Amino acid sequence: MTFVGDVNSTLDDGDADLLDARDAIVELFGVLGVDVRPNATETESEMADLLLNLRESFRESEDWETSDLIRDRLQTLGFKVEDTDSGAEWFRN
């Protein structure tokens, strides 16, 4: 197995230390003005947007359980959801 394959396998297993290290590296590069986050494909973007719109509908109707379920499921699929004043935003972990 290659180094990249090993890293991806470890990330898929959810190794917390490695995920924390990756997040720190992404943040460091962000401070330097370099976006190193993996980009989502167009289809992934459309699906994530659709799910966030559904999630927002559940939030508006105060169905917190379903709203949280959508957020948590997106997270397990590798998307981070952040609620902001202007609405929910997502990016690929």
Image (tube, rainbow, N blue to C red):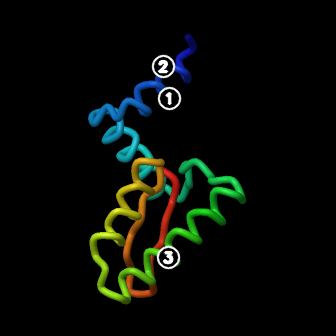
Of tags 3 and 2, the one toward the viewer is 3
Using the image, tell me which numbered label, if any, was put on residue 6: 2
Residue at the image point whose x is 28% and y is 76% from the top? 64
Marks 3 and 2 sit apart, C-alpha to C-alpha, by: 35 Å
Residue 87 point in image, percent of width and height:
44, 83
Residue at the image point whose x is 40% and y is 53% from the top? 75
Residue 46 point in image, percent of width and height:
66, 66
Marks 1 and 2 sit apart, C-alpha to C-alpha, by: 6 Å
Q: Nearer the viewer, residue 85 or 70?
A: 70
Disc 2 on helix, strand or loop? helix
Using the image, tell me which numbered label, if any, was put on residue 8: 1
Q: Amino acid at mark 3?
A: Leu
In the rendered view, tell whether residue 59 sits above or below residue 48. Answer: below
Q: How many neighbours does mark 2 have within 10 angstroms: few (below 14), some (14-19), or many (20 or more)? A: few
Q: Amino acid at mark 1?
A: Asn
Q: How many neighbours does mark 3 have within 10 angstroms: few (below 14), some (14-19), or many (20 or more)? A: some
Residue at the image point whose x is 49% and y is 65% from the top? 90
Residue at the image point whose x is 52% and y is 78% from the top? 53
Q: How many neighbours does mark 1 have within 10 angstroms: few (below 14), some (14-19), or many (20 or more)? A: few
Marks 1 and 3 sit apart, C-alpha to C-alpha, by: 30 Å
Q: Nearer the viewer, residue 56 or 78?
A: 56
| Among the two numbered marks 1 and 3 on one chain, the one whose residue lies closer to the N terminus | 1
Using the image, tell me which numbered label, if any, was put on residue 54: 3
Residue 85: quadrant of the picture: bottom left
Residue 39 point in image, percent of width and height:
62, 52
| Among the two numbered marks 3 and 2 on one chain, the one whose residue lies closer to the N terminus | 2
Q: Amino acid at mark 2?
A: Asp
Q: Nearer the viewer, residue 22 or 85?
A: 85
Disc 3 on helix, strand or loop? helix
In the rendered view, tell whether residue 71 sits above or below residue 20. Answer: below
Is 86 displayed left or right of 5 in the figure?
left
Task: State if disc 2 and disc 1 touch (CB < 8 Å).
Answer: yes
